[in-house]
Image (cartoon, helix red, strand yellow):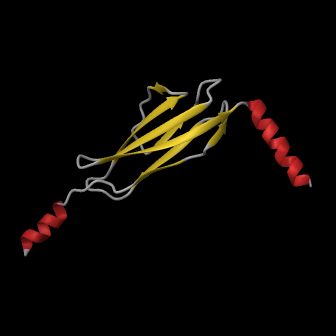
């Protein structure tokens, strides 16, 4: 009856899955761009991000599903966490990014060019 219908409408549930879409490697000086996605939830999920640069937490104010962050010069690794959910449930996704110095990046390109020339 009507009671069942109203319960369905009011059904609150958290997201089943949360994922970060981003690169795994980047070059020093570039800006990291991450996109966090969550499966359907009621109410809709809100997002928060945490960034660890070489293991040290970075204080950022990022509450949308997208994140832009430029690592410090000399940083080697980012660990990015996106926490998404609502009052019912939160899920945290984690993503690791290796940062290469400009010199390393040039060397990698040179190797690719040499392989392509064979």
Left or right relative to 11: residue 33: right
Q: Residue at the spot x=89%, y=48% of the render?
A: 114
Q: Residue at the spot x=27%, y=47% of the render?
A: 86
Residue 108 point in image, percent of width and height: 79, 41
* On screen, residue 51 above or below 9: above
Most extreme residue toward the front is 55
Q: Nearer the viewer, residue 4 or 53?
A: 53
Q: Residue at the spot x=61%, y=26% of the render?
A: 75
Task: Name the image quarter holding the N terminus.
Answer: bottom left
Task: Name the image quarter holding the C terminus.
Answer: bottom right
Query: Can residue 69 be seen from the camera position used here?
Result: no
* On screen, residue 18 above or below 50: below
Q: Residue at the spot x=42%, y=35% of the render?
A: 62
Query: Image quadrant of residue 50?
Result: top left
Residue 115 point in image, percent of width and height: 86, 51
Query: Can residue 23 be seen from the camera position used here?
Result: yes
Left or right relative to 15: residue 32: right
Left or right relative to 91: residue 73: right
Most extreme residue toward the right is 118
Residue 72 point in image, percent of width and height: 60, 24
Residue 18 point in image, percent of width and height: 41, 51
Left or right relative to 61: residue 88: left
Q: Total of numbered circles in the picture?
A: 0
């Amino acid at each position: 009856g009507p009671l069942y219908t109203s319960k369905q409408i009011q059904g609150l549930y958290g997201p089943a899955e949360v994922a970060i879409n981003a690169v795994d490697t980047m070059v020093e000086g570039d800006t990291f761009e991450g996109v966090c996605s969550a499966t359907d939830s009621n109410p809709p999920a809100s997002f928060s991000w945490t960034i660890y640069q070489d293991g040290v937490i970075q204080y950022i104010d990022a509450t949308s599903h997208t994140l832009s962050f430029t690592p410090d010069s000399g940083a080697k690794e980012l660990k990015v966490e996106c926490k998404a959910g609502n009052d019912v449930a939160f899920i945290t996704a984690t993503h690791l990014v290796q940062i290469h110095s400009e010199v390393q990046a040039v060397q990698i390109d040179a190797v690719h060019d040499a392989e392509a020339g064979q």
